[in-house]
Amino acid sequence: MKKFFRLTKERFKKFFKYWDLLMLLVQRDLKLKYRRSFLGYLWSVLNPLLSMIVMAIVFTRMFKRNIENFPLYLICGNILFSFMRDSTTQAMTSVISNASLLKKTYVPKYIFTLSKVTSCMVNFVLSLGALFIVMIATKQPFRWMNFMIIVPIVELYVFCLGLGLLLAAGTVFFRDIRNIWNVVTLAWMYLTPIFYSLDSFNDSKTKDIVDMSKLGLFIRRFNPLYMYIQQFRYFIMQYESTLVEVPCGVLMWRGAVCAGLMLIVGLITFNATKNKFILYI
């Protein structure tokens, strides 16, 4: 036990030793993202806002949706999923894209993955401005419970960091993961209730095609993003699907456990393979 605490203390000291480098990498990623852009960081607000407007028009005009305050419901799911997709996609190539630096000097390899996920988190925080604009436009009341969104945000950040470390390590050895991940995230988007509600799975017409109740059960139990998005929606708009069989408090600890496990898996995989990176990058 003493050895464990000593190693943990040493690792934290080592991490804070490179804190300035982490901040520089995050700033670099943000500047590169909006380089030569006239509106710059304002796109962090405009992108989710414009996407929400387009999707809201499509799914309210072309498809019938019986979801109260659908624009707010939509943007809550969209900004969280976008953060997961963007952070993991960028984290995936974080090691191989810095190959020249890793070959010249010693830098903790995880720092590049951490910087990518963190820069995406900064962009996500800025995108909350779009969320507040939609809340005002749809006359959604502001309550003290809104501040509780920090819980699913932190859980999702930890989850994406662990997943990003896992993908970054895998991509060093198997570059095809980059192409596979595009398909995985597309399927993941449709298996996440972003623009639909699980209540719609009660529709008898849908049940004639496939047993949607089983699919809904799978989403509730095995889709981590469902746990984070459902928490987020609850704290913003007090939304709870009638199909949710567990209270928001249970989703909170489930989300925390899932995020912790993903971080552990990511760290173990990354640490076990990092010494071989130099041979493949």
Image: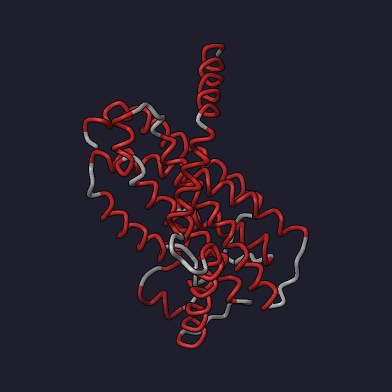
191 to the left or right of 171:
right
On screen, residue 127 above or below 152: below
Name, please, the residue furthest toward the top: 2
- Residue 273: image quadrant is top left
Q: Residue at x 38, y 28 (%)?
A: 271
What residue is shown at x 47% (from left), y 38% (from top)?
Answer: 263
Where residue 61 appears, x then y in whole percent?
Answer: 49, 88
The residue lying furthest to the right in this view is: 144
Q: Quadrant of the C terminus?
A: top left
Q: How is the image coloured?
A: secondary structure
Q: Is residue 52 above or below residue 184?
A: below
Left or right: 245 with respect to 263? right
Determine whether, in the image, residue 141 is placed left or right of residue 100.
right
Dividing the image into 4 quarters, which one contains the N terminus? Answer: top right
x%, y% of residue 160?
Answer: 47, 47
Q: Is residue 208 shown above or below 158?
A: below
Residue occupying the point 44% across, 51% down: 87
Identify the image quadrant of residue 104. Answer: top left
Q: Kindly indicate the quadrant of the structure image that contains residue 146.
A: bottom right
Please name the residue shown 61% across and 62% down the image: 128
Q: Position of residue 18 (x, y in %)?
A: 50, 30
In-front residue for pair 205/149: 149
Q: Is residue 56 above or below residue 132?
A: below
Q: Which x, y percent locates residue 172? A: 27, 39
